[in-house]
Amino acid sequence: MIPLSYYLALSAVLFSMGALGVLIKRNALIIFMSIELMLNAANLAFVALSRHFNILDGQIFVFFVIAVAAAEVAVGLALIVAIFRSKQTIDVDQLNSLKG
Amino acid sequence: MDLSLILFMILAAVAVLTAVGLLSSRNAIYAALFLVLNFATVAVFYLLLGAPFIAMVQVTVYAGAIMVLFLFVIMLLGAEKLPKGKVLPWQRPLAITLAAILVVEGGILLFQRLSLAATIPNPGAEVNSVKALQDLGNQLFSQYLLPFEVTSIVLLVAMIGVILLTKLEKGETQG
């Protein structure tokens, strides 16, 4: 018997750590991994609430989120490879071509 | 304190520590391996929540396919470590403050709307039955049929996009 609030608290902590990673990291790949961490935290809350309310919709949403995350990772990594080809770096601080 | 609560505490500690490891590692490969461990612990949470199908999808798709893709790209680019550059001195404390505010905010919002006493029962044998999987499949292919089909288009578009993005233009040389 685990309280539902524990799962939600863990999910909130993991989500915030993902957001923190996006804010403080310079490596585009690690920023991307932090985004995955956030998606995962949201999935955990989905499944916990799905169990709490005893309906399956939450699990099906998680299934869709995972499918979309897979597509997102493929496109995102292709973008990072393309950026690396033209800039020779994936440091997001170096991508300042639009700076006046 | 029963066994599942102890298991939860240990796994939660592992999940949070691997997330800290992800944030504190300078090498992208270590970060990716920490993330694999984090996904594995979340998969065990799904099992504790009585969702074995989602747990298996998590292991195969997330910890398997997606992270292998990550490791591939990290090693392909050889960009696992960034050279030390100058960073804004106020950025890190500000980011940590904002993340702390986000935790507090999220916590308050969640706890205001939920009865704290609600507990999740341990999954019994019924979640491992074919019946449970059948229910999930039935709902997925009836009520959620349209989103399911749209997902296939999303995956197709992503595949075409990736091929287009990584294809070298005519006359362009491999940089």
Image (cartoon, coloured by chain):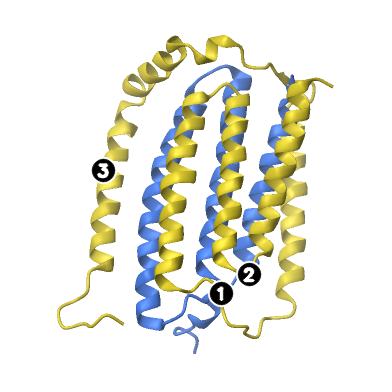
The tag on residue B26 is 2
Q: Residues within 10 Å of mark 2 (few under 14, many from 20)?
A: some
Query: Does dot 2 land on a helix, a strand or a loop?
Result: loop
Mark 3 lies on residue: B153
Q: Give the residue drawn at x 49%, y 28%.
A: A59
Chain drawn yellow in the picture: B
- The answer for how far apart the CA atoms under marks 2 and 3 are is 37 Å
The hue used for chain A is blue
Q: How many marks?
A: 3
Amino acid type shown at disc 3: Ile
* Picture disc at residue A4: none
Give the mark nearest the N terminus, 2 or 3: 2
Q: Are marks 1 and 2 in contact (CB under 8 Å)?
A: yes
Residue A54 in view: yes
Q: Are marks 3 and 1 in contact (CB under 8 Å)?
A: no
Q: Is residue A57 depicted above or below B168 in this figure?
A: above
Which quarter of the figure is the N terminus of chain A placed in?
Answer: top right
Judge from the rendering whether residue B91 lies leftward or rightward of residue A34; answer left or right. right
Q: Earlier in the sequence, mark 1 or mark 2?
A: 2
Q: Tell me the CA gap for discs 3 and 1.
A: 36 Å
Which residue extends farthest right? B1
Question: Is B5 on the left or on the right of B134, as rendered?
Answer: right
Q: Is residue A72 above or below residue B81?
A: above
Relative to the observer, which residue lies in front, A56 or B129?
A: B129
Residue placed under numbered mark 1 in the picture: B81
Work out whether residue A86 or residue B9 is closer to the camera in this orientation and state it: B9
Q: Nearer the viewer, mark 3 or mark 1?
A: 1
Pointer 1 indicates a residue of which chain?
B
